[in-house]
Amino acid sequence: MTLTKKFIALLFTLGVLSFLGIVLGSVLVPLDWSNELIFKLRIPRTLTAIICGAGISIAGLLMQTIFRNPLAGPSVLGISSGSTLGVAIGVFTMQSIGVTWLNEKFSLSILAVLGAMLVTAFILGVSRFVKKSNTLLIIGLMMGYFVSSVVNIFSFYGDKTNLQSFVYWGLGSFNKEIELDTLSIYYIPIILIIILVFFLQKPLDMLLMGEKYARSLGLNVSKIRWISILFAGVLVGVITALCGPIAFLGIAVPHLARNFIHKSSHKWVIPFTLVMGSVLGLICDIIARLPGMDGNLPLNAVTSFIGAPIVVWIVFKNKMV
Amino acid sequence: MNKTTTLSLSNLYIGYTKENPLIESINIEANQGDLIALMGLNGSGKTTLFKTILGETPSIRGEIEVGNSSHEIHKNISVVFTERIDIYGFTVADMIAQGRAAHTNIFGKLTNHDKEVIQEQLTALSLEEIATQQINSLSDGQFQKVMIARALAQETQVLLLDEPTAFLDVKNKRMIHDLLHSLASSGNKTILASTHDVLFCNSYCSKSWVIDNKRLKEKNPKEITELFFD
């Protein structure tokens, strides 16, 4: 199959899954546009899965390229934890100064973005002094644990109502029961950055050869690294603020894309990661809804269930053991 | 610089501290068609000299003139390093195309001219048969040959090679040495290769630059043999 055909097949799959995403759920809804359930719940939920699945996967791709490490990703290097810390600070401190959880989503997003970027910048700073990727991964994991412990301390002293909403948020979900108008505040930066990432395809390809070669071709390596960090940080921050920390999609999808097309050039990997991220996001969301049954599984339970075996497969395939 | 001089180092001091330069007072020139062996003991400053020429490390003082009009180093100098890089999903042709990155637009789109240059390199270095092979499946010798093709596709006057055959067996070493010799003798390129291989230096190179006692000097084969073997 040529790459174009593969891409069309993926887009078709995305179309079918979007349809299923709208009709499937605890209640099977006929595709009736006058139905409120479709407009208020199913379409926003499906759109969130498509956009956030794509966004978090693109963030993972950026990180894997700038770290030149196949195991880099938002959840592995503690970036998601950074966002979580931002949100935790927001949730547990804002209430003490009289700001409530629901109407301060925008400021929570900013805190989540700052938290994500702070951790990414730290990891990138450390990566300059660390040659072995395994060492960097261990530092990233430890950073994640460290940040999580700070979050736990916040949670311990936090108000019970806030704690409940925080824990619920941490389970992850594409179902936010928010109007599309409000959701677009989240969608716009994600879509904007995804568009901008297409302009990075050439420098990202140059970085695949390593910093030394990239520099010899005239690339300003540190500038591209920082732009990529900014983009990955904003993507992870905004998506985490909206959906909670989403595990494994960011690390797994770029690998699935590369293995699907047998290419690493970002000219191809960016669009394939984008669509495969949406597809996998939708699949996870549909599974999480337990079609035909009441209730929802936590999104993270599903993404981890699917993503963890993929990561193990990557480790074995790249002979990292 | 006269018309055939492609690389000129004048009163150049390199290193990381002013008080203790690695190499002092370098005054040397390279011309079109030169294949130069850069020799010196480990830690004598070969890699630092390369980094300084490439603009990665600032010089302590002195001047480096490369090429003619353009100030963009990547349009005048291409480089091949010792270490093999590990990339999944890159064919030989994809890798050579990376050499065109210095010339392509923001999306890296290859023009017809770029494609012609890539094809020329594939033909010139007899890589046509493996053009669609994955880079990771190549032998070390083939890989280094592809990296040289990539550097040639950059279309620069000067080619720097940092110990290009350090990890290669005798047969592959010879293949790369023959290749460098024919590239330089075709008259278009200036090739500066750091090496510890005295045989390569004496049999293939038109000049030898030797770093000894903080000085970079051009030496003849007899002097080199005396310096390293006596």
Image (tube, coloured by chain):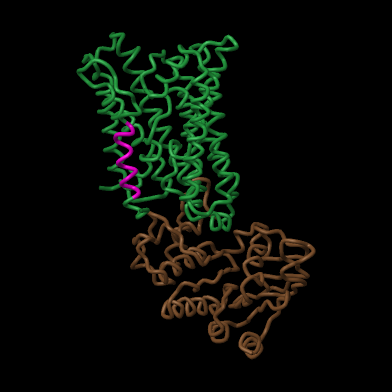
**In the figure, residue B198 lies in which quadrant?**
bottom right
Q: Is residue A114 magenta?
A: no
**In the figure, residue B76 lies in which quadrant?**
bottom right
| Left or right: where A48 falls relative to A291 | right
Chain whose colour in the figure is brown? B
Residue visible at 71% across and 59% down in the picture:
B58
Which range of residues does the magenta coloring cover? A303-315
The location of residue A166, given as percent across then percent down, is 45, 19
Residue A276 visible (yes or no):
yes
| Left or right: where A169 falls relative to A206 | left
Chain whose colour in the figure is green? A
Q: Is residue A312 above or below residue A37?
A: below
Magenta residues, dominant SS class: helix
The location of residue A155, given as percent across then percent down, is 49, 21
Q: Nearer the viewer, residue B71 or A27?
A: A27
Residue visible at 50% across and 41% down in the picture:
A199
Q: Is residue B225 above or below residue A1?
A: below
Residue visible at 45% across and 14% down in the picture:
A181
Q: Is residue A311 magenta?
A: yes
